[in-house]
Image (cartoon, rainbow, N blue to C red):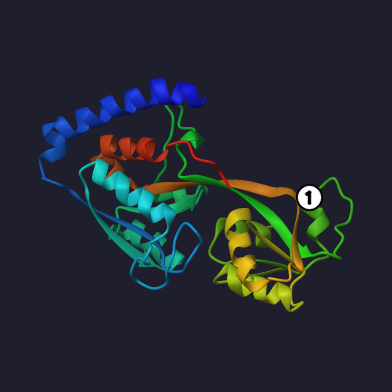
Amino acid sequence: MGAFWYTNGWLSLLCLLALWLGSGEAWAQARPVVRLGYADHPFEPYLLGEGSQPGKPPGSLVSRVRRSATQLGVELQLVREPIPRLLVSLERGTLDGIFPFSYTPERIVIGAYPLDKQGELLSSQHLMRLGYYLYGAHDLSLPANADSWAQLAPFRLGAVKDTAVGELLAQRGLSVTLTRTPERSLEMLLRGRLDLFVGPRYSTELVLARLDPAKRIRRFGQPLLARDYYLVFRQDFYRQQPELCQLWWQLLATPEADQ
């Protein structure tokens, strides 16, 4: 996979990028302005800082998006909003795209994802792939059950609200408390107000390194589920600028270690 990407994949991408930057369409508006939005709360190490402005540093994912905009000759404007408002802004046309968002049937109605010729999601063009693990006290035992979801029924779960993972837990009828940030859920876990937290490994363990120096919380086994996250464009923006969107997806799909 790595050898193929660096020989064929990169050469193809560089050729497409050269054609885009050299075309009259790309420069008809001389550095087109693109407004992209992301959440106004931190998601370490990908999105840092809190509030309406990017953090200093902004986070690894924001830096990647900025670099890709520079490579594409785009003037990038970044906007931070609560997650529900980002979806509304995309639908209303005040944003051209949002990141990082996983696929749901509801979101594809308002947002354009990378798709193949058959209309299937191109998971290879994700921004990142995250495995979601269970975190709990060392003395907690999960009941043996072939159904990984059924084994969670007796427990008080925590997850981040306004996310597809949090919504999925709630839809399955599980007892779940949704908080604005992972820190809040993990604080509740440490105080015994939750039994388990469901979160991505790297981000969760960065927070635990600060909150739990005594290492009272552990990670359980294999991930409960995995999600791909994308740069999602507004549907009419994609229809107006399909080449730009496709190039942007390819540029951000540089192979990296998934967490």
Q: Is residue 166 visible?
A: no
Residue 229, horizontal then vertical, whole percent: 49, 48
Residue 54, horizontal then vertical, whole percent: 35, 65
Q: Is residue 44 left or right of residue 224?
A: left
Q: Is residue 64 left or right of residue 17?
A: right
Give the residue at mark 1: 148
Q: Is residue 96 left or right of residue 171?
A: left
Residue at the image position 81 percent from the left and 54 percent from the top: 150
Q: Is residue 56 visible?
A: yes
Q: Quadrant of residue 178?
A: bottom right
**Please, what secondary structure does the residue beneath circle 1 have?**
loop
Residue at the image position 38 percent from the left and 63 percent from the top: 57
Residue at the image position 66 percent from the left and 71 percent from the top: 186
Residue nearer the viewer, 131 or 234: 131
Residue extending furthest front? Answer: 213
Residue extending furthest right? Answer: 144
